[in-house]
């Protein structure tokens, strides 16, 4: 039995706060959750965010950028 494991960043301890569910632009059958972690950091469940070799605070992805733009831009009208 092979007991070696891949070196993967530990999964964060998510709070119940799902901030948004964002659709994948490349696959209409997929969507990703943008979540607020118990540690106060914002996480995305997409592979691009998960596999970055940066500290959690320095990670981003296109879903987080789009969410931030939509959430913080003033409403027209």
Image: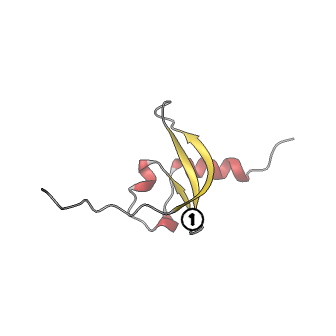
- Tag 1 residue: 41
55 on left or right of 42? left
72 on left or right of 49? right
The correct choice, above or below, for 50 with respect to 55 in the image is above
Taking depth in this image into account, of 56 and 36 the one nearest to the observer is 36
Taking the view exactly as shown, the residue that stands out farthest to the left is 1
- Quarter of the N terminus within the rendering: bottom left
Kindly identify the residue that appears in the image at 64 percent across and 53 percent down: 68
Taking depth in this image into account, of 46 and 66 the one nearest to the observer is 46
Kindly identify the residue that appears in the image at 51 percent across and 38 percent down: 24
30 on left or right of 41? left
Q: Position of residue 73 (x, y in %)?
A: 74, 50
Q: Position of residue 19 (x, y in %)?
A: 64, 51
Taking the view exactly as shown, the residue that stands out farthest to the right is 77
Kindly identify the residue that appears in the image at 46 percent across and 32 percent down: 27
- Of helix, strand and loop, which one carries label 1? loop
Kindly identify the residue that appears in the image at 50 percent across and 63 percent down: 13
54 on left or right of 4? right
Q: Position of residue 74 (x, y in %)?
A: 79, 50
Q: Position of residue 69 (x, y in %)?
A: 66, 50
- State the colouring used for the structure image: secondary structure
The correct choice, above or below, for 28 with respect to 50 in the image is above
């Amino acid at each position: 039995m092979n007991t070696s494991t891949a070196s993967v960043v530990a999964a964060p301890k998510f709070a119940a706060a799902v901030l948004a569910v964002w659709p994948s632009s490349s696959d209409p059958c997929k969507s990703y959750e943008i979540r607020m972690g118990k540690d106060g950091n914002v996480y995305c469940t997409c592979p691009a965010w998960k596999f970055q070799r940066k500290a959690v605070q320095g990670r981003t992805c296109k879903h987080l950028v789009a969410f931030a733009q939509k959430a913080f831009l003033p409403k027209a009208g």
